[in-house]
Image (cartoon, rainbow, N blue to C red):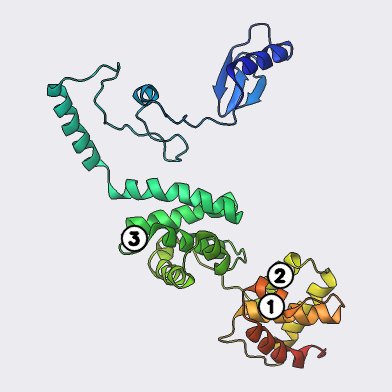
């Protein structure tokens, strides 16, 4: 964070690019001239400074953190008025009473979102999810809270399940293991919450999840393994031939079938990848991969 002296020098150097009478103001994270619109610099850190000494603690504002997407709310607390004057015991008891009433007026829905929204932003950033998917995940989660499905379930579990639902709605082939690894939540809990959301929430929002076939995962695995388009086409052809000639995929994980097709395709195209590498990427066991390879090898050379 630059000092005040450095900022003043920076503004003086940039005044030649600005108008004759610059009026600099902080707007949306930037130092901007209000007269001509010239952007001086970006504000990199606008979070409140931590208070260490007793004097800084007394001067610190009693408001909530600025990064929350909900927006600032009034908090009634402390033993000083708006001018910083200590309250008399008579008024202090009234302020305490007022603060208690104010806390009681905050609904459980608001308190839940106050915790959930920063967590959603964190998961979105770490998973690299598009904004449209995050918006739908928030819609799903808020509807889940309104239907009081949060009883006995953690916020992070329902958030992860909502994100997985939103990804399925938009047809983005991301595995549940990727989400649970980032959120550090057991897969079993996320799957249970996901099924609950599908039954109770999605019908009210007119959203439908897409069930991915193995060929949808082929593109994902092919890109992450950095294989050629020829290998991808070979894997897709193997899957199509298997379906045409009666291969029964019911009850089989589509990720395992896609991983087996990619493995066979890489062997055919001389772009060898190990079973361990592919099974780790697809998040299936090597035993499952070998079983699916054995099933698909019958259709590898079928035209």
Image check: 233 left or right of 5? right
Q: Do the CB atoms of the residues marked 1 and 2 lie less than 8 Å apart?
A: yes
Image check: 107 left or right of 299? left
**Residue highlighted by disc 1:** 258
Q: How far, Cα to Cα, is label 2 from label 3?
A: 35 Å
**Residue highlighted by disc 2:** 221
Q: How packed is label 2: few (under 14 Cα within 10 Å), some, or many (20 or more)?
A: many
Q: What element carries label 2?
A: helix
When the figure is inspected, residue 194 is found, relative to residue 106, above or below; the finding is below
Q: Which quadrant would the N terminus be assigned to in this image? A: top right
Q: Which of 161 and 209 is in front in this view?
A: 161
Q: Is residue 169 visible?
A: no
x, y (%) of residue 231? 82, 74
x, y (%) of residue 55? 37, 21
Q: Which quadrant would the C terminus be assigned to in this image? A: bottom right
Q: Is residue 177 visible?
A: yes
């Amino acid at each position: 964070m630059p000092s005040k002296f450095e900022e003043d020098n920076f503004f003086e150097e940039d005044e030649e690019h600005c108008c004759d009478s610059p009026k600099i103001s902080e707007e949306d994270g930037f130092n901007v001239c209000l007269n001509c619109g010239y952007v001086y610099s970006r504000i990199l850190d606008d979070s409140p400074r931590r208070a260490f000494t007793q004097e800084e603690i007394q001067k610190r504002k009693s408001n909530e953190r600025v990064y929350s997407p909900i927006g600032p709310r009034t908090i009634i607390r402390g033993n000083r008025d708006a001018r910083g004057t200590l309250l008399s015991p008579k008024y202090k008891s009234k302020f305490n009473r007022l603060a208690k009433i104010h806390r009681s007026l905050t609904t459980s829905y608001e308190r839940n979102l106050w915790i959930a929204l920063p967590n959603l932003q964190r998961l979105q950033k770490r998973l690299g999810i598009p904004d449209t998917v995050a918006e739908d995940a928030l819609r799903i989660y808020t509807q889940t809270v309104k239907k009081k499905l949060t009883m006995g379930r953690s916020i992070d579990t329902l958030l992860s399940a909502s994100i997985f639902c939103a990804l399925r709605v938009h047809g983005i082939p991301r595995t549940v293991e990727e989400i649970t690894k980032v959120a550090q939540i057991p897969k079993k809990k996320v799957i249970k919450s996901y099924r609950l959301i599908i039954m109770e929430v999605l019908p009210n929002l007119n959203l439908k999840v897409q069930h991915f076939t193995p060929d949808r995962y082929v593109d994902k695995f092919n890109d992450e393994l950095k294989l050629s388009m020829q290998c991808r086409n070979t894997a897709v052809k193997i899957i199509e031939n298997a379906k045409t000639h009666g291969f029964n995929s019911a009850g089989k994980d589509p990720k395992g079938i896609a991983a087996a097709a990619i493995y066979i395709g890489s062997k055919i195209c001389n772009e060898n990848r190990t079973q361990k590498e592919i099974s780790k990427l697809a998040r299936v066991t090597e035993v499952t991969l070998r079983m699916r390879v054995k099933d698909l090898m019958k259709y590898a050379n079928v035209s």
